[in-house]
Image (tube, helix red, strand yellow):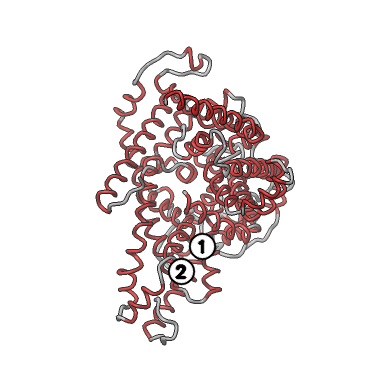
Amino acid sequence: MREDMRQTEALRKRNRWTLFKKQKNLHFFMIPLTLWAFAIFYLPITGNIIAFEDYSIPKGLFNSPWVGFKHFANFLSNDYTLLLVRNTLAMSLMGLVFGTLAAITMAILINEISHKIFKKTIQTISYLPYFISMAVCANLFINLLGRNGPVNDILFSLGLLKEGYPFLEKEGLFWWILTIQNIWKTVGWNAIIYLAAIAGISDEIYEASFVDGAGRFTQLFRITLPSLLPTISILLILNSGYVIMGGFEQQFLMYNPMVMDTAEVINTYVYKRGMGGADYSFATAIGMLQSLASIFLLLIVNKTAKKLSGSGLW
Amino acid sequence: MQRPKFIKMTTADYTFEFFLYGFMIVFGMMVLFPFLYLLALSFNQGLDAIRGGIILFPRKFTVENYALIFSNNQLLGALSVSVLRTVSGTSTAVLCTALAGYIFTKENLVGHKFYMAVFLLPMYITAGLIPTYLTYKELHLTNSFLVYIIPNLVWGTNIIIMRTFFKQIPSSLQESAWLDGAGDYTIFFRIILPLSMPVVATIGLFNAVWQWNSWFDTMLFTRNPKLETLVSLLARMMIEQQSNQISVAKITKRAKYMTPEVLKAAMTIITTLPIIMVYPFLQKHFVKGVMIGAVKG
């Protein structure tokens, strides 16, 4: 019996090898591409080792002195860390919460439009900012909100302002400006997925509810929103890890020295310390802590969602 | 409101529709207004624009902002690098992504699961900024045009989108070609690819928009001014203005009434224009792509 099994096992192995030789054309492409993936994606991951060293370029990975958790401890005991984490979480959460609300509202409203061409036009316009580079988007907003930009002009001509108001130099406004910019850029795009979910709800449910006397709002709260709930929760779980990873391009292009205390996020700080100050090891340690925190967040949110609604990602 | 088609609309319904359409028109204008404002600004004389008060139309009309871009070597160079990286980056990425997607449809491939894991894992685990920079430096990718091409060859989501599309093609087509003696690559190039133009367009546009819009990789990986793209130059000008440096903005010194603001406005319009021109194709294919990605991912 055992002899038999060993034979089939040997046969299977030989078959695999014959199969491999038959498929050599395909492996001829896949093997180099896999090596490419290791160089581009996986080699940098092992490069995180420098977080435990005092890395400098001339000494290299192998000769730089080993310092253990020094950089991690440094970052965690730094007063500035709290500020960075606060700013990152605040802007990510505001983007997530208001962005989701805006996208759902947009999807529901677009769905109510009965005129086909009007609907199509509005949708087409609404995606446009999504395809524009963040550099362009930031330049648009800096010009709009500048001292001699149109927002100031309009407020001035309405008599609401006496002189040019520097919106982008106010610490208290920065989070809101970025949230609005974020919604402006992504609301149309993010609405697509909710529109698809709404389209998936059967017409019969709505018609039956209409016959039973349900009005617009009853339908919204009793049919549409409950049907969207699974989509909303999946997207929220998926994005939960991103809450601590988020933010870079927007802040990096929009901020200025006047608003640094509310504008600096973990990613911009990592860039400044790493690329500006050549503090490679310290910056890498921050990045590692950030990744760990994001995985941790994802696990917790998924578990909570499972307990509350009975369904998570896995 | 969802209702049977034959029921008449009430006054409340008409009021609702009125506000709905009104809101949508305001929303549409708010999306478009920043572009129109920058368009007006880009055609306005620089010193005059400082006074403010421009809303939709230029006050002192001039084309010198655009003329400067098309006569200045640095800006022309940046424009050509933008075009070059978009064209070469997109074509290589589409080819590699399509081939990988095609090979991933073959479930009996030895090591199928391993290959899948190799390309899907990076969607969830990323290395971080500094280790990536240092590794690319070791690989001699920095300060080279290749840094725009090599790291962007394939991306997990795009492979999955391609694979999903290829799987819908009836396998009988491949089998009959195979019986006629066609090899894997012949089948791919002669049968699969011609039948998959919609998804090729989707992935191509994904990549092209990504390449055209990228600026941070230029800033992170290159120190060579010859590798600057139009968008990265725009970003650099904005960042320099945050800290009151003028090395890039000094381009404007040669023109008498020019300011960095109107130059940036003209650069913004030039970077936006190609996107708007391909936009009709773009949105159709992108929406399709995001649906496939959402179903599978």
Q: Name the residue under label 2.
A: A110
Q: In which quarter of the image is the N terminus of chain B?
A: bottom left
Report the number of numbered marks: 2
Asked whether B281 or A140 is in front, the reply is B281
- Are the two marked residues, 1 and 2, in contact with CB atoms closer than 8 angstroms? yes
Q: Is residue A251 above or below residue A62?
A: below
Q: Is mark 2 on a helix, strand or loop?
A: helix
Left or right of residue B38, residue A220 in this image: left
| CA separation in Å, label 1 and label 2 | 10 Å
Question: Relative to residue A53, is residue B57 drawn left or right?
Answer: right
Three-letter residue code for mark 2: Ile
Which dot marks residue A126?
1
Instruction: Look at the image and tell me whether residue A67 can be seen.
Output: yes
Q: What chain does badge 1 belong to? A: A
B10 left or right of A141 in image: left
Q: Position of residue B84 (x, y in %)?
A: 70, 42
Dot 1: element: helix
Q: Residue B271 carries which label?
A: none
Residue at the image position 59 percent from the left and 36 percent from the top: B218
Could you tell me residue A187's position as x and y percent? 45, 58
User: Which amino acid lies under the numbered mark 1 shown in the image of this protein?
Assistant: Ser
Q: Mark 2 lies on which chain?
A: A
Residue with the most extreme front position: A1
Which percent across, then down, holds residue B20?
43, 74
Residue mark closest to the camera, 1 vs 2: 2
